[in-house]
């Protein structure tokens, strides 16, 4: 393990106002999104869609890294170039999702635990050989009646730390993703409480297990009201709540926080990231960036709709969303940014 190399990669992932593109949907998730639009759920359709993404002209202007799924990292674009090479040629660092999904947690109805630690050391070695330089593991925390439990938070934090330290051993920067879900009618205050507790528990485990904070990235949820909550706060209030929470819980040694979008609309995700940077950028120890999946891809996926003739328009939509979030990192995103 070369510590300086890990630090360099982590910093590069959040440098120059760029962000990370999550394109690592597993078979069930990708197929579900395709099915909703009537796109065939085949290996070839998934390959063609991922080719559309990685060959988007100019994507590297606002995207620093892309998180791939196991199937994609081994696939090629039509001309025979490996997807991973297409990304590297565009100046985009390739990453890989390595958790094996969030499964029902035994004894804890309504809660999930992410699996995938068995054999992880060997898989990480293979991914490094293929060219990946960072990885992602997502833990899911659900807010509901009497949940999350301490057991669920602790088990997920423990697994995140075990994954992170294995990544660093293998020369991969770990993206540590504890996601408090937006589903439900809970208030922003409840999301704040849970997110703060989750972050404290995660960083406690990262410390205990010897993860080097300078060589990792945190990928959290924003502090938001539940999707079904009757009170939906403004972007400014969400920015204030999120930063209050993170300033309490995230050590200054972490180079960057790259938010997930979690089911927010593409425009809201950009507006909220923008509000955080407008109000706090100069006062923060870490870079505030994005690692969006749906908030970057969804408009492009809908335009593509499985049809070759739509590829260019879909690529324009993806390029546009990446640019909007690049602007949000600079605190320069406005309604007018959407009209360009
Ligand atoms: P969303 O931005 O769609 O939540 O996806 C990010 C991600 O990588 C979830 O693990």
Image (cartoon, helix red, strand yellow):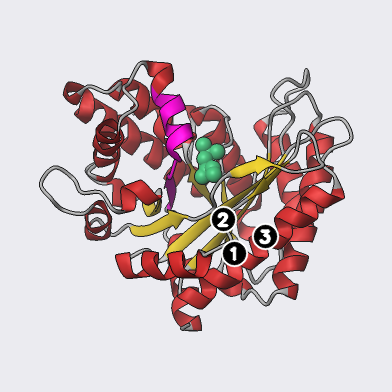
Gap in angstroms between the C-alphas marked 2 and 1: 9 Å
Establish if 279 lies above or below 311: below
Gap in angstroms between the C-alphas marked 3 and 2: 9 Å
Q: Residue at x 29, y 46 (%)?
A: 59
Give the residue number, with chain letter if any, for mark 2: 116
Give SS at disc 2.
Answer: loop
Going by the image, does 142 lie left or right of 17?
A: right
Give the residue number, with chain letter if any, for mark 3: 159
Q: Residues within 10 Å of mark 2 (few under 14, many from 20)?
A: some
Q: Residues within 10 Å of mark 3 (few under 14, many from 20)?
A: many
Q: Quadrant of residue 273?
A: top right
Q: Residue at x 61, y 52 (%)?
A: 115
Chain part drawn in magenta: 19-34
Establish if 38 lies above or below 21: above
Give the residue number, with chain letter if any, for mark 1: 163
Q: Looking at the picture, how far across and down is residue 83, in whole percent?
A: 25, 51
Observer able to see residue 267: yes
Contact between labelled residues 3 and 1, with CB atoms less than 8 Å apart: yes
Give SS at disc 1.
Answer: helix
Of badges 2 and 1, the one in the foreground is 2
Q: Looking at the picture, how far across and down is residue 118, in whole percent?
A: 57, 62
Of badges 3 and 2, the one in the foreground is 2
Q: Nearer the viewer, residue 85 or 154?
A: 154
């Amino acid at each position: 393990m070369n510590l300086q190399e890990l630090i360099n990669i982590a910093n590069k992932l959040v440098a120059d106002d760029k962000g990370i593109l999550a394109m690592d949907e597993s078979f069930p998730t990708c197929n579900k999104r395709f099915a909703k639009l009537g796109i065939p759920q085949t290996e070839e359709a998934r390959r063609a869609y991922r080719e559309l993404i990685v060959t988007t002209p100019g994507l590297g202007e606002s995207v620093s890294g892309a998180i791939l799924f196991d199937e994609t990292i081994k696939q090629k674009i039509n001309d025979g170039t490996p997807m991973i090479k297409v990304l590297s040629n565009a100046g985009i660092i390739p990453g890989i999702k390595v958790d094996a999904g969030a499964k029902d947690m035994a004894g804890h109805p309504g809660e999930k635990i992410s699996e995938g630690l068995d054999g992880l050391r060997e898989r990480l070695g293979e991914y490094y050989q293929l060219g990946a330089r960072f990885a992602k593991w997502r833990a899911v925390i659900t807010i509901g009646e009497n949940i999350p439990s301490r057991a669920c938070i602790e088990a997920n934090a423990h697994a995140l730390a075990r994954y992170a330290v294995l990544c660093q051993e293998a020369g991969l920067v770990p993206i540590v993703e504890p996601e408090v879900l937006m589903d439900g009618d809970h208030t922003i205050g409840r999301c704040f409480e849970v997110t703060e507790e989750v972050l404290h528990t995660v960083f406690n485990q990262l410390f205990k297990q010897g993860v080097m904070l300078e060589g990792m990235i945190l990928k959290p949820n924003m502090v938001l009201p539940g999707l079904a909550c009757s009170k939906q706060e403004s972007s400014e209030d969400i920015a204030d709540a999120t930063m209050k929470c993170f300033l309490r819980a995230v050590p200054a040694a972490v180079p960057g926080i790259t938010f997930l979008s979690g089911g927010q609309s593409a425009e809201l995700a950009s507006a909220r990231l923008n509000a955080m940077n407008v109000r706090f950028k100069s006062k923060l120890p870490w870079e505030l960036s994005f690692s969006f999946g749906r908030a970057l891809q969804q408009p492009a996926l809908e335009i593509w709709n499985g049809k070759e003739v739509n590829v260019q328009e879909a690529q324009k939509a993806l390029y546009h969303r990446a640019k909007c979030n690049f602007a949000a990192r600079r605190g320069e995103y406005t309604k007018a940014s959407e009209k360009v």
